[in-house]
Image (spheres, helix red, strand yellow):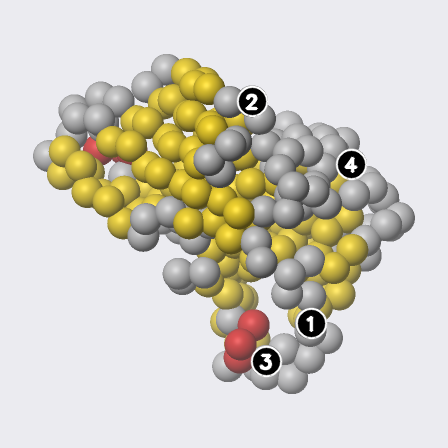
Amino acid sequence: GQNIDQPTEMTATEGAIVQINCTYQTSGFNGLFWYQQHAGEAPTFLSYNVLDGLEEKGRFSSFLSRSKGYSYLLLKELQMKDSASYLCAAIDSNYQLIWGAGTKLIIKP
Amino acid sequence: IAGITQAPTSQILAAGRRMTLRCTQDMRHNAMYWYRQDLGLGLRLIHYSNTAGTTGKGEVPDGYSVSRANTDDFPLTLASAVPSQTSVYFCASSRSTTDTQYFGPGTRLTVL
């Protein structure tokens, strides 16, 4: 079956760096997305990786290793507003998005 | 530009009633999707439409139906609501099936 695994919850300190890991098993692979979702709101797009390597976008970076079925989202210089859930999703061979359950990130002052 | 809108924002519904959740996008996106989100389970695809006039079943289609008469609108109908359909429903759209999906604000539905 198809599966996305990511930690349920993580805690980090304001100003620090946190890495949220995601492993995937899908029938085929056509890219991986990271979304941010604040409580009570809709998911919003953060990043997309289809090739191996690191994509940097300001304080956020996303890494992909297709051979390992692995991705991570790196958040630097954490701010209180980064407290949210982070969703990992992979596109399978049918071009459907397979979603992880999300990682709730708690930022402490 | 509104992007993607959903109505109603929230609804309490008696079991057995029929309900249609509305979704409209003004981005001229070809693909549209309906998801439900429940605590601890993440987003689950109910139905999708790759282009106007076509629809497909997702992971959890039972009890739901959709139509895609034009590019902009993608309503989701619960023919006879049951309590297990209590959830937050998100509509999303994308330019194509491999492009970024953009989400509406969601509808919080409670079936009693």
Choose between B83 and B8: the one closer to the eye.
B83
Pointers 1 and 3 within a single chain: yes
The correct choice, above or below, for B16 with respect to A87 in the image is: below
The residue at the point 14 percent across, 33 percent down is A13
Say which residue label 3 marks: B82
Whether label 1 touches label 4, CB < 8 Å: no
Q: Secondary structure at mark 3?
A: loop
Q: Nearer the viewer, mark 1 or mark 3?
A: 1
Q: Amino acid at mark 3?
A: Val
Say which residue label 4 marks: B30
- In the rendered image, residue B9, in percent from the top left (x then y), is placed at 53, 55
Which of disc 3 and disc 4 is earlier in sequence?
4
Q: Amino acid at mark 2?
A: Leu
The residue at the point 42 percent across, 25 percent down is A63
User: Cα distance, mark 1 to mark 4?
Assistant: 24 Å
Say which residue label 2 marks: A51
